[in-house]
Image: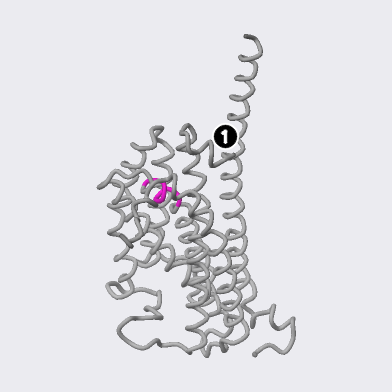
Amino acid sequence: MQWNSIGEFFAMGGYAFYVWGSFGACLLLMVAEPILARRRLNEVRAGIARALLADSLADELDNGSQ
Amino acid sequence: MNLINWFKFASPQSFYPLAGKMIPWFWALATVFGAAGLWLSFFVAPTDAQQGEGYRIIFVHVPASWLSMFIYLIMAAWAGLGLALNTRLSGMMAQSLAPTGALMALLSLWTGALWGKPMWGTWWVWDARLTSELILFFLYIGFIALQAAIDDPRRADKAGAILALVGVVNIPIIYFSVKWWNTLHQGSSVSLTKSPSMAQTMLWGMLLMALCFWMYSIAVALTRARAIILERERHTEWVKHAVE
């Protein structure tokens, strides 16, 4: 272990901006991308479920009016 | 017949639930490899003699760069398969990989710039390695834009496949650019033919982080693949049962 204190760890031997800028960008994008992908899946699922519900309601109305 | 019928999983209908079962496992693997990789990267790997702590960017830069090239090859392989066999799933797989590949290429360029500034004194140079990686990023963006511009998904797949296959020529150019041209960029850290020129713990940190990025890419691409499958097959009978 090369760090004597938390402050030293975050300072990264004077390269803090570059090291944390790199790891931070990776963290940010690699958290955002799965959230967006998951949201896309949920949205298409919800859309299909809504269409199915609309179909079944339309069927009920048709049957009721006969 | 004891053989698994692999062609069964080539249909979107059977692949959709299979992908759903696999995704949590790939997330688990990504987390384990990521935790171990970060531990080695920051607490075990020694300070570099020349670059001090600044070299630790390698632990994200190299995995992102590897994955940006590897994902492209897989994407082009799926695209080529779709072009040759006209299977429905192939185009969906290629399409689901493209944004993740673009993200890896972007991270490679970004972390490379942040590494180049303190070590070379510049964010960017127009040399072979950096320029060919930038072209890779544009190939991903071009693939995504081309597919988005064509309404009919099967025609979009075909056009995208041709672009993806032509772009494959860029991959060996990126890989060998540090050998073929004079460049600021250092040579390969890891080679198949000679022993690595770095400390064992640095190497292991890098490999574990690469495995983490790899598992991450599979998990997120599979999630996107499921969304694309539903989007394209939403008017089929099986989708109704899959969503209920």
Q: Residue at x 38, y 33 (%)?
A: B152
Is B94 included in the stretch rendered in magenta? yes
Task: Tell me if mark 1 has few (under 14), some (14-19) or many (20+) residues whose alpha carbon lies within 10 angstroms of its own.
Answer: many
Splitting the image into 4 quarters, where does residue B118 fall?
A: bottom right
Q: Secondary structure at mark 1?
A: helix
Which corner quadrant holds the C terminus of chain B? top right
State the image coordinates of residue B181 (x, y, percent, origin top left).
29, 72
Q: Residue at x 36, y 67 (%)?
A: B127
Which corner quadrant holds the N terminus of chain B? bottom left
The magenta span reads B91-96
Q: Nearer the viewer, residue B93 or B189?
A: B93
State the image coordinates of residue B192 (x, y, percent, origin top left).
32, 81
Q: How many marks?
A: 1
State the image coordinates of residue A2 (x, y, percent, origin top left).
65, 90
Relative height, residue A30 to residue B54 (above, below): above
Q: Nearer the viewer, residue B120 or B106?
A: B106
B85 vs B11, left or right, is: left
B195 vs A21, left or right, is: left
Main secondary structure found in the magenta portion: helix
**Residue that sits furthest to the left in the current view:** B84
Q: Residue at x 41, y 88 (%)?
A: B197
Three-letter amino acid code of the residue under disc 1: Ile
What chain letter is assigned to the residue under label 1? Answer: A
The colour scheme used to paint the residues is one colour
State the image coordinates of residue B37 (x, y, percent, origin top left).
56, 77
Q: Which residue is identified by label 1?
A: A48
B155 vs B237, left or right, is: left
Relative height, residue A58 to residue B109 (above, below): above
Is A45 included in the stretch rendered in magenta? no
Q: Nearer the viewer, residue B12 or B57?
A: B12
Relative height, residue B155 to residue B59 (above, below): above
